[in-house]
Image (cartoon, grey):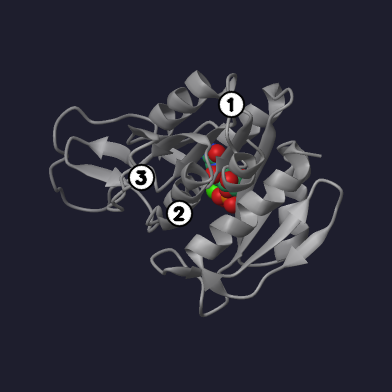
């Protein structure tokens, strides 16, 4: 029993994870999206499942192959779909890690037919999507809530503001400036900012190792 809890420290823990981009439809053949590969979130999901967690992965349109059989994968396309899937599972989860690159805006109307090319410019009206992470922060009870932040300026300050505003326990700041970090890459350079204002910078690492760092951090808190 003792050995098992060492090897499978997340046994009995339900972890909800989002990953990948979202696609927001413009018309039946076009969308607004982003370059997120989903690699970071999928790496967290696989590592958590290997450590014994009951994993629910809500995955946007991503080419990543998820190999771990023990987890539940819910495929979604839009921010709205992702939000609904996440709320279906949050109440029964112990930990939620939202690493998806959710579109901040979507077309306010989706054309039912393919938009034909015309003279002049085309204007699209965009409306905000719901902030999934903030909506969890607003209702969370005992869940340990983790967000990501992608910043190109005032990195730490902006990450701290996001942590507070969204009521998070941990925010993982992605450094895009670093050569070893980025959307399509297998490596990442992150800094943790904790609820109690600790700032923990890490070296450039494989995304699988970043995943383990995040899960190790969470373990310290949920078993404390
Ligand atoms: N996020 C979310 N739902 C959204 C937008 C963001 O759940 N509609 C989550 C992301 O998964 C990430 C965190 O919020 O964990 C921060 O995302 P980021 O894009 O860095 O911040 P925003 O709050 O969207 O602000 P901005 O893009 O203006 O920096
Ligand atoms: Ca955003």
Q: Residue at x 45, y 23 (%)?
A: 84
In the rendered view, would you say 66 is above or below 206?
above
Between circles 1 and 3, the one closer to the viewer is 3
Q: Is residue 140 found left or right of 123 in the rendered image?
A: right
Residue 95 lies in what quarter of the image? top right
Residue furthest to the bottom in view is 179
Secondary structure state at the residue bearing disc 3: loop
Ligand 1 contact, mark 2 (Cβ < 8 Å): no
Mark nearer the N terminus (1 vs 2): 2
Residue 80, given in percent of the width and then of the height, sits at 42, 28
Q: Where is the N terminus found, in terms of image quarters? A: top right
Secondary structure state at the residue bearing disc 2: helix
Give the alpha-carbon distance from disc 1 to disc 2, as whole Å.
19 Å
Mark sitting on residue 93: 1
Q: Residue at x 52, y 34 (%)?
A: 16
The quarter of the image that holds ligand 1 is: top right
Q: Is disc 1 surrounded by few (<14), some (14 to 19) or many (20+) residues within 10 Å? A: some
Mark sitting on residue 43: 2
**Residue at the disc numbered 3:** 68
Q: Residue at x 23, y 53 (%)?
A: 120
């Amino acid at each position: 029993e003792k050995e098992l809890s060492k090897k499978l420290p997340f046994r009995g823990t339900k972890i909800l994870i989002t990953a990948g981009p979202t696609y927001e439809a413009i018309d039946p053949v076009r969308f607004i999206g982003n370059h997120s590969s989903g690699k970071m979130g999928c790496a967290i999901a696989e590592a958590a499942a290997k450590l014994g967690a009951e994993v629910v992965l809500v995955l946007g349109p991503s080419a990543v192959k998820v190999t771990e059989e023990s987890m539940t994968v819910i495929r979604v396309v839009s921010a709205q779909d992702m939000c609904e899937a996440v709320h279906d599972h949050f109440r029964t989860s112990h930990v939620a890690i939202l690493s998806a690159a959710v579109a901040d805006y979507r077309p306010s109307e989706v054309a039912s037919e393919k938009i034909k090319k015309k003279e002049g410019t085309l204007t699209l009206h965009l409306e905000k999507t719901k902030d999934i992470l903030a909506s969890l922060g607003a209702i969370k009870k005992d869940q340990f809530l983790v967000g990501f932040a992608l910043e190109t300026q005032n990195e730490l300050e902006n990450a701290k503001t996001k942590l507070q505003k969204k009521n998070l326990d941990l925010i993982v700041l992605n450094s895009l400036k670093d050569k070893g970090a980025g959307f399509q890459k297998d490596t990442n350079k992150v800094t943790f900012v904790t609820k109690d204002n600790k700032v923990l910078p890490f070296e450039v690492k494989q995304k699988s190792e970043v995943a383990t760092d995040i899960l190790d951090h969470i373990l310290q808190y949920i078993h404390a």
